[in-house]
Amino acid sequence: MTFGPVTPGSPGAIAESREAGNTINLTATSRRPGEQVIKVLLAASAFLSVIITIGIVVALFAPLTTFFANVSIVEFLTGTSWTAGFGAKDSWDDKDWGVLPLVVGTLLTMTIALVVAVPIGLGVATYLSEYASERLRQTVKPALEVLAGVPSVVYGVIALIVLTPILQDLLGANIFNNLSPGIITGFMIVPIVASLSEDAMTAVPRSMREGSYALGANRMQTTVRIVIPAALSGIVAAVVLGISRAVGETMIVAIAAGSQAQLTLNPLVGAQTMTAFIAQVASGDAPQGSPVYYSLFAVGALLFVMTLVMNIFSIALVRRFRQAY
Amino acid sequence: MTATLEERVAEPPELTGTKRPDVRSAVFAGALWACLLLAGLFLMAVLLVILQRGWARFDLALVSEQPSRLNPEGAGVQSAIFGTLWVMLGTILLAIPIGVAGAVYLEEFADNTKWWNRLIEVNIQNLAAVESIIFGILVLAFIVRGPIGTGFVVLAGSAALAMVILPIIIITARQALRAVPQDIRHASLGLGATVWQTSWRQVLPAAVPGIATGTILAVSRAIGEAAPLILVGATAFVTFNPEGFFSRYTVLPVQIFTLVKFPEEANLQLAWAAILLLIIILLAMNGTAIYLRNKFQRRW
């Protein structure tokens, strides 16, 4: 806010604003106790978000002490077999706890999604930012919002019932495979990649394009050599956010990728992902305190750390490109 | 603020090169156009498939009957519709007051040179990108089980969805508040109003259309959300309508997930009809939000 300090009767703040000279001190002269109460309530509402974050960290990481008391962290991170759903419900020892199959399943689906989403998303963004008329933009942007607004459970049904049979005919895919949910997840994140990278390209100042045109470059050269490099950090941020969405996407893989955790790079056989495992355990009956119940938190914590690292990276990149101009 | 940025000051000068466009340029433009076409075709295909497959069972029984494993041909999804209504009521009651209050604090009261206010801001940005299933785990650990221990009830679902949309509401409400010009605040403060009186009587009323648009979009996101609710008990096969916030429940997206897993063709048809219903609700809400944005967005 530019109208100066709001803490009533804070002499230091008043003196500061007098020195600054250009801000007017508008602090109320009468003390209204209700005002302070309201301010505290509003601040508490804002601070609730921090409490939620702390809650997430506690909820995910506190159960890990029990989990890693029974499973070695080395086995968890490097083991190549995950059989959490098999064996006796209350036994830790008759199961394999290597999370790699779930991680590889997640990364495989994510890679397929990116192969679809990055070219299409960037193509749409570049077209809208550099080529499209204002009228086309006004039509396409709400359509992108509709695409982004379709619930992921609907995309999951479309992947399983509509796309998978086509892939079965064409490529001999299994009924549960990672290709179909990967492609559909890719289309789901197209709006995210497109709208964020379009923002980044639109933020490139017009003078840079004019400079390029003045040197004789045509529209394609200007786009490829001037606008895209200038917007690169924003574009990378958009892609990273898309990756984090693809990694965390749950319903599409839970419906269409099946529930078999297996270490494979073949997209035509189904490999369970981390989110699909969480959904499977949660929708089945996992008794509180059972090994499977704890493994849900271990996989959730790993997912949270993976997406958090990408999100922080993405937010930092966006901040950098905002500061550039 | 974005509205004024979009206004072009003047027509941009014609900057097309004098040479005829070369082949590479044409191919490049064609490829970009193909991307747009592909995305558009995908959207059309999705909507058409939903309409075509959902139409068969899009009848009165869909809303008037309860789900049934014995008679999927005549079953409906009434419990899921009422479940969605109850869960959304709770979500709205939790998320909107807290979200708007948080936005008012950050925009009107907070001194953003203080580290704790910056922490809140960065934290909200991060929270907006946290995957929704994580909020489900949080509610499972603290509200369904653990210290509060409500069990798998409507309120737990509302809490999970409220956390999913809280950052979205705060971020959009802040943008709406920021779009209200400073002059209005200065005039109000100059007449002797306190900061809260200014916020409540001047700034918030002026920002209502923007806040409403953001809120509708956030709520429509929550209606379609299934992942966090799977963790907090919505996968139960519930054949009765919830009676309150402490009743067992299911919601439309999770009911669709449940129906698709059943082997019978009739259940799949019912799922497509429920999808059509869900899409119609969401398109109507999105349409309302876009209408509000265009109609009431004031340019200062």
Image (tube, coloured by chain):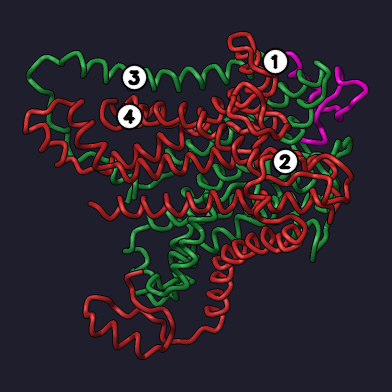
Amino acid tagged 4: Leu
- Label 1 marks a residue whose chain is B
Residue A181 shown left or right of residue B24 in the figure: right
The reply to whether callout 4 and callout 3 are in contact (CB within 8 Å) is: no
Camera-side residue of A196 and A247: A247
Badge number at residue B55: 1
Q: Which residues are magenta?
A: B55-80
The span from disc 4 to disc 2 (Cα, nearest Å) is 45 Å
The reply to whether callout 4 and callout 2 are in contact (CB within 8 Å) is: no
Amino acid tagged 2: Trp
The span from disc 1 to disc 4 (Cα, nearest Å) is 34 Å
The span from disc 1 to disc 3 (Cα, nearest Å) is 33 Å
The residue identified by callout 4 is: A128
The letter of the red chain is A
For the point 35% across and 89% down, the residue is A12
Residue A39 included in the magenta stretch of the image:
no
Q: Earlier in the sequence, mark 1 or mark 3?
A: 3
Residue A201 shown left or right of residue B189 in the figure: left
Mark 2, other Cα within 10 Å: few <14 / some 14–19 / many ≥20: many
Q: Are marks 1 and 3 on the same chain?
A: yes
**Residue A279 placed where, x, y %?**
72, 40
Badge number at residue A82: 2
For the point 27% across and 20% down, the residue is B29
Q: Is residue A146 visible?
A: no
Label 1: state its secondary structure: helix
Above or below, A117 relative to B250? above
Mark 4, other Cα within 10 Å: few <14 / some 14–19 / many ≥20: many
